[in-house]
Image (cartoon, rainbow, N blue to C red):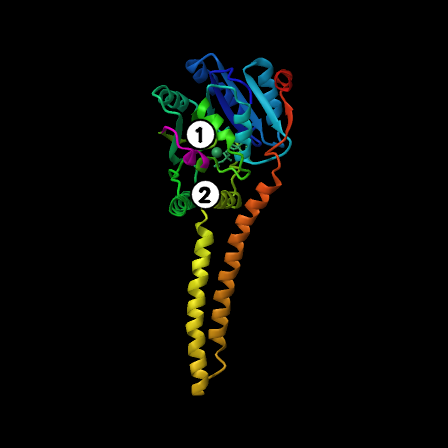
């Protein structure tokens, strides 16, 4: 991490966003100029296969306030965000998506709240023009589930579009956990937080990088990072099923002595299926937590930087 140099830094993770970079950059500059001429933009290329980094390099040639970092491969949105924050030098740091779904002009509102004394300003998506009914419903229930299961509260429809001051960025970077669920970490951190609402327009170019499977992974990460309740629930479910099983066993023995025993394959099958299912789910839940422990125990760096945009490379490596 560098000492504070810029007043405001904007961190933007990129994964195959060649169609959005120029539009975003053009829209961002007048907004940042309004806030402070002392701005900085940190583009983090998260292993793009397209011309994203090339475009960023071109922008850097024209504007020395722009820094490009290319990660050695695709590490995922959350890690790319952390990488960007580690390289941001601003007194104020803003994170936003590259696809124009986080409207640049909202930065003025975020900054305004910062001026009013807030340490962290989060955003809440009022509606996403292009999100499917399925995404809306799964998102709604995900937040219900995580808020019921964990001790932290995460505002539904929150986005990784946020402003943080230097104090909270430094605090965030002290949290070294490998599976990074930024929204959860921010909520857990505390400090003086505010919220700003915005309407997310459709993605300008390209497709969403969050497939259903990735979203599911993200949800499991979120829940297992902030709650041990699934472990307990599987234990209680095990207890309940064992108790019912015991009652059924007593009933079976009584029936046996009464001489009423019959083949009864249906009941056997059903109980095997139910118990088998619960066992597998419970093992799976333990596996999720074990995988997290495994990840932490390996203690690998979160990411590697392959390349910086040429101009800045000297200052960073110095
Ligand atoms: N992103 C990234 N690495 C990934 C996936 C996404 O850096 O592995 C970036 C992406 O380029 C975008 C932001 O994270 O700037 C959010 O992704 P996206 O717009 O696909 O998510 P959605 O808005 O659909 O939830
Ligand atoms: Mg998007």
The disc, 1 or 2, on the residue closer to the chain's N-terminal end is: 1
Q: Residue 201, position in %: x, y?
A: 42, 31
8 to 76, vertically: above or below: above
Q: Position of residue 243 (x, y in %)?
A: 42, 68
Kind of element beneath mark 1:
loop
**Is residue 15 visible in the rendered structure shown here?**
yes
Q: Secondary structure at mark 2?
A: helix
The quarter in which the N terminus is drawn is: top right
Q: Residues within 10 Å of mark 1 (few under 14, many from 20)?
A: many
| Of the pair 185 and 11, the residue shown nearer to us | 185
Q: Residues within 10 Å of mark 2 (few under 14, many from 20)?
A: some
* Residue 127 position within the rendered picture, expressed as x and y whole percent measured from the top left: 38, 35
**Which quadrant does the C terminus fall into?**
top right
Residue at 50% x, 57% y is 282
From what the image shows, is residue 1 above or below residue 64?
below
Task: Determine which residue is flagged by label 2.
Answer: 226
73 with respect to 221 (left or right): right
Quarter of the view holding residue 129 = top left
Q: Residue at x 57, y 18 (%)?
A: 59
- Inspect the magenta stretch and tell me whether residue 292 lies in it: no
Specify whether residue 51 is in view: no
Residues at marks 1 and 2, CA–CA distance in whole angstroms: 21 Å
Q: Which residues are magenta?
A: 185-193
Residue under pointer 1: 161
């Amino acid at each position: 991490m560098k000492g504070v140099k810029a007043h405001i830094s904007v961190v933007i993770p990129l994964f195959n966003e060649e169609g959005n970079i120029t539009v975003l950059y053009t829209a961002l500059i007048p907004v940042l100029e309004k806030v402070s001429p002392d701005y900085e933009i940190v583009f983090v290329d998260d292993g793009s296969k397209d011309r994203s980094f090339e475009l960023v390099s071109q922008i850097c040639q024209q504007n020395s306030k722009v820094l490009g970092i290319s990660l050695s491969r695709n590490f995922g949105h959350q890690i790319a965000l952390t990488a960007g924050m580690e390289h941001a030098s601003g007194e104020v740091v803003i994170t936003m998506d590259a696809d124009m779904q986080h409207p640049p002009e909202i930065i003025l509102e975020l900054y305004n709240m910062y001026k009013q004394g807030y340490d962290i300003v989060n955003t809440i998506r009022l509606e996403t023009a292009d999100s499917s009914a399925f995404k809306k419903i799964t998102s709604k229930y995900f937040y219900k589930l995580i808020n019921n299961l964990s001790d932290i509260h995460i505002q539904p429809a929150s986005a990784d579009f946020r402003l943080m001051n230097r104090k909270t960025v430094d605090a965030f970077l002290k949290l070294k956990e490998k599976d990074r669920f930024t929204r959860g970490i921010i909520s857990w951190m505390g400090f003086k937080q505010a919220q700003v609402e915005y309407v997310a327009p459709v993605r300008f170019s390209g497709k969403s990088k969050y497939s259903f499977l990735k979203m599911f992974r993200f949800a499991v990460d979120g829940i297992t990072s902030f709650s041990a309740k699934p472990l307990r629930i599987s234990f209680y479910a095990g207890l309940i099923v064992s108790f019912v099983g015991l009652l059924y066993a007593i009933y079976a023995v009584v029936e046996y002595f009464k001489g009423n025993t019959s083949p009864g394959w249906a009941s056997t099958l059903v109980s095997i299926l139910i118990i088998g299912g619960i066992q597998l789910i419970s093992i799976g839940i333990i596996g999720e937590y074990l995988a997290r422990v495994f990840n932490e125990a390996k203690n690998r760096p979160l990411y590697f930087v392959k390349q910086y945009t040429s101009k800045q490379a000297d200052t960073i490596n110095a």
